[in-house]
Image (cartoon, rainbow, N blue to C red):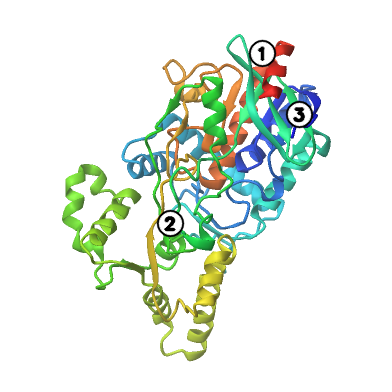
Amino acid sequence: MPMNFETVEVTTDLLIIGGGMGACGAAVEAAYWAKQNGLKVTLVDKASMPRSGAVGMGLSAINLYVGLAEGKNTVQDYVKYVKYDLMGVARDDLVANIARHVDSSVHLFEQWGLPLWKDDDGNYVHEGKWQLMISGESYKVIVAEAAKNALGDENIYERVFITDPLLKDGKCVGAVGFSVRENKFYVFKAKAVMCAMGGTVGVFKPKSTGEGAGRSWYPPFSTGSSAYFTFKAGCEMTSQEVRFVPIRFKDAYGPVGAWFLLFKSRATNALGENYMETRADELKNWGKYGAAKPQPANLRNYLGMLDMKEGKGPLFMRTEEAIANLAKQYEGDEKAFKKKMKTLENEAWEDFLDMTIAQALLWAATNVEPEVRSSEIGATEPYFISSHSGASGAWVSGPEDLSGGTDYFWGYANMTTVPGLFAAGDATGACAHKFSSGTHAEGRIAGKSAIKYILEHNTLEEVAPEVIANLKEV
């Protein structure tokens, strides 16, 4: 049934598309520099910012914290880790730029009110070498609040679905879309645009069936908007063949990171064999990557899948063994032992209650006590993402001090090959393992860079009315 959509025009200097961690990082940073130069920053999100993006439900850990001030790691340590885990598929300049700025984003989160776990000495509790434990049910709410405060409500448009970029003389000069709540067609005109619209889920059928058919590990509302927008704008893309297949707890897709890193758990096949040990010779076939510590995630997954192929499945996370091992040091001190066990049980459940509530519900519904019995794990369906452990996205410029004088730099950090179009998070390729904090930091990098571009190209390009009319008709 035909409907009359009112056309709403919004003119701004910088248009940020998305509402996740990258968009929030860009909003905070760009707004700071924009106010100093009399510029306007506008954000448009298809959802509602407090619960928008990949960590909208919450998170149990910040997966990227280099710890530069503490001297724990170096930027190059992280670059090497990322390159080895992705079997060499990574841009040193992009990964290094994120790594050297990410700690400041984490410190901002803490200033804004995010509870980070601390030990008795007041130090951060590490899940692993790069990860910090948090009480993160409201992680995204806290980060979004800071972004909203920086922009002002009058510059935020929620529940507006962007469909197309606006292009003029090879430049990106805005975007169009429609409200999902009102009969309104929006035309956003801008001097620069930043894309941070999430990754791609749903290309491959989820392993969940029946009532759980819509369940996936990565957010089901990450429907490929970043890839679509950058493709449509004419951006050069990279690593589109890289698919991320994580190992997760079966059925509810609960992440396994805390169990491997914090609880020091093992994964075994149905016979109780640790396939990382029984198939160690297979790693020798992969050269330096097979010898890397830790082993690349795809090789760990591959060894488990070889066991499955030979009929040794299913695979199990030995949760009961891990908790028992951690509590052993308290044997002989009954009071301390009970206190430690209670803490471990709480941490085991909080890991999922912070971010994957369905896993905690499944455990409760099936009477699973992780300190008593193992839980089944398995490979998920593939995803196309770049902020986590994938690499697919737009090819973007590196920073001048790291990439200047090379083909990896063309004027502005994180600008795509289309002038005026910047990208962050799942929208950028070849710089994996950003996770939530690194994506926020990359958004800040792109936001500041976009403001610099606007100051040096301070012209609003008008697209022909018939072009907009055609887009509205479609």
Query: Is residue 151 in view?
Result: yes
Mark 1 and 3 residues: CB-CB less than 8 Å, in contact? Answer: no
Drawn side of residue 415 relative to residue 16, left or right: left
Q: Secondary structure at mark 1?
A: helix
Task: Find disc 2 in the rendering and name its residue.
Answer: 207
> Badge 2: how crowded within 10 Å, few (<14), some, or many (20+)?
some
Callout in the foreground (2, 1): 2
**What mark, if any, has residue 185 been given in the picture?**
3
Query: What is the spatial separation of the Cα atoms under label 2 and label 1, in whole angstroms?
Result: 49 Å
Q: Is residue 423 above or below residue 371?
A: above
Residue 281: image location, x then y, percent: 16, 55
- Give the image location of residue 70, x and y in percent: 51, 50
- Residue depicted at 47% across the width and 48% down the height: 71
Other residues around mark 3 within 10 Å, as few (<14) / some (14–19) / many (≥20): many
Q: Secondary structure at mark 2?
A: loop
Label 2 to label 3: alpha-carbon separation: 37 Å
User: Which residue, as the protein is rendered here, is positioned at the far front?
Assistant: 1
Q: Amino acid at mark 1?
A: Glu
The residue beneath circle 1 is 456
Q: Specify the amino acid type for callout 2.
A: Lys
